[in-house]
Image (spheres, rainbow, N blue to C red):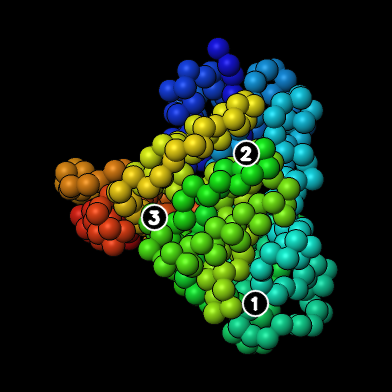
């Protein structure tokens, strides 16, 4: 029996671990959280920080995997590359992993390869008190080394600048931040499989965000409802982007905004998309390929079959329930919500008795609902009907 080691066990990793089990694989999961949701589905579990490469290496040597799977976990991309290379397993080089996670190196790769991207300015932690702005307002600040929408802030003028850059700096590991031009327009993600250096665009996902100031994600839908010519431009740009950072055999999750000047890259991940995108949504909207299985196969050195994937004719949507300030005292109405037609998945992650702040990024949620429909609007509307049946009692 082949063995795969998953780096990261958050809630959106659970379906990928379950897929590995269905493939007949022996699974291990590494996560620093003792209550990591994906632990429930693994044959073995290991409690360890994904950023501690040497500790993860020791775990991997003991587990003796045939493949290292990062799945939908951005935090583990560099560690996964380091461990895979050391053990002689399929995976990224460390340089490619860094290009795909360090936002500055990513933008520099886009510049070298003429990939459309925002104008940007890098502010190092020690410069935060004294730097001079070189961009015109409005702008976006973000950490150079974080994920999940953490630390993103929209800045309209000089009066908001200091608060925003401090907020962004504190959300990253290094404290260094990016200031980028504010790109206005529809936002999408593009789910890609790169096989032997050739990108295959599997699906384009329309994104719904909270808007300013933090732009965290509150919903997605597939397939994209954008015009065909726009989608073709998006496909071309996403393909150039994954080549620019050096991906060879890998899934990729590429984020793009369609501006008045055309599509521009936001960033990409050398991994599967989280937030149900490459599990429940793709499994509903696409036939002929399973993205999670393909990512596992690539980690094992197997080339997935991409000869016959196509839109299934069904549409899918997910809506998230952002946390709001207060103590979550009860969740009611789940049984009634589960009886509503076209529900694909309801996942409640809010912890009874826990105090929450108002959501400012993708990590602060009470749960999510996935539904299908004949159109993306119908699927998203059905998600909202389900959410309206569930009472999150916050005091």
Q: Residue furthest top?
A: 1
Please provide percent x and percent y for residue 23: 47, 22
325, 165: nearer the viewer: 165
Are there few (<14), some (14-19), or many (20+) residues within 10 Å of tag 1? many
Residue for point 52% across, 32% down: 305
Q: Which residue has dot 3 on it?
A: 223
Please provide percent x and percent y for residue 66: 65, 21
Are there few (<14), some (14-19), or many (20+) residues within 10 Å of tag 2? some
Are there few (<14), some (14-19), or many (20+) residues within 10 Å of tag 3? many
Q: Earlier in the sequence, mark 1 or mark 3?
A: 1
Q: Which residue has dot 1 on it?
A: 181
Picture layout, residue 347 above or below residue 21: below
Residue contact at pointers 1 and 3, CB within 8 angstroms: no
Helix, strand or loop at mark 2: strand
Residue for point 38% across, 54% down: 222
Q: Which residue has dot 2 on it?
A: 195
Q: In the image, is 209 to the left or to the right of 304?
A: left
Using the numbered discs, state the Cα–Cα distance from disc 3 to disc 2 in whole angstroms. Answer: 22 Å
Q: In the image, is 111 to the left or to the right of 198?
A: right
Q: Is residue 120 visible?
A: yes
């Amino acid at each position: 029996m082949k063995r795969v080691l998953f780096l990261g066990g958050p809630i959106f990793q659970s379906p990928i671990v379950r897929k590995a089990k269905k493939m007949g694989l022996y699974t291990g999961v590494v996560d620093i959280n003792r209550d990591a949701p994906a632990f429930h589905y693994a044959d073995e579990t290991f409690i360890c920080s994904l950023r501690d490469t040497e500790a993860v290496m020791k775990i991997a040597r003991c587990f003796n995997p045939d493949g290292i799977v990062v799945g939908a976990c951005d935090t583990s991309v560099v560690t996964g590359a380091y461990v895979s290379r050391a053990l002689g397993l399929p995976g990224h080089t460390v340089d490619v992993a860094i290009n795909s996670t360090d936002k500055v190196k990513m933008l520099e790769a886009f510049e070298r390869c003429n990939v459309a991207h925002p104008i940007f300015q890098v502010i190092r932690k020690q410069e935060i008190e004294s730097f001079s702005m070189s961009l015109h307002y409005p702008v976006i600040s973000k950490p150079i080394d974080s994920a999940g929408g953490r630390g993103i802030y929209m800045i309209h003028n000089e009066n908001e600048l200091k608060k925003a850059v401090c907020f962004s700096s504190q959300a990253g590991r290094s404290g260094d931040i990016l200031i980028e031009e504010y790109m206005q327009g529809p936002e999408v993600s593009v789910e890609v499989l790169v096989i032997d250096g050739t990108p295959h665009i599997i699906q384009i996902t329309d994104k719904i965000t909270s808007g300013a100031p933090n732009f965290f994600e509150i919903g997605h839908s597939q397939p994209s409802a954008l015009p065909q010519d726009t989608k073709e431009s998006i496909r071309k740009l996403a393909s150039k982007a994954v080549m620019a950072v050096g991906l060879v055999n890998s899934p990729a999750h590429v984020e793009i905004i369609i501006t008045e000047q055309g599509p521009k890259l936001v960033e990409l991940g050398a991994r599967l998309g989280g937030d149900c995108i490459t599990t429940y949504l793709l499994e509903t909207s696409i036939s002929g390929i399973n993205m999670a299985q393909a990512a596992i196969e690539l980690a094992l050195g197997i080339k997935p079959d991409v000869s016959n994937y196509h839109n299934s004719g069904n549409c899918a949507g997910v809506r998230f329930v952002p946390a709001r300030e207060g103590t979550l005292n009860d969740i009611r109405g789940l049984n009634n919500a589960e009886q509503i037609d076209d529900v694909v998945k309801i996942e409640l992650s809010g912890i009874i008795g826990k105090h929450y702040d108002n959501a400012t990024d993708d990590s602060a949620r009470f749960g999510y609902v996935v539904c299908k429909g004949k159109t993306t609007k119908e699927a998203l509307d059905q998600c909202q009907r389900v959410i309206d049946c569930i009472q999150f009692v916050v005091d």
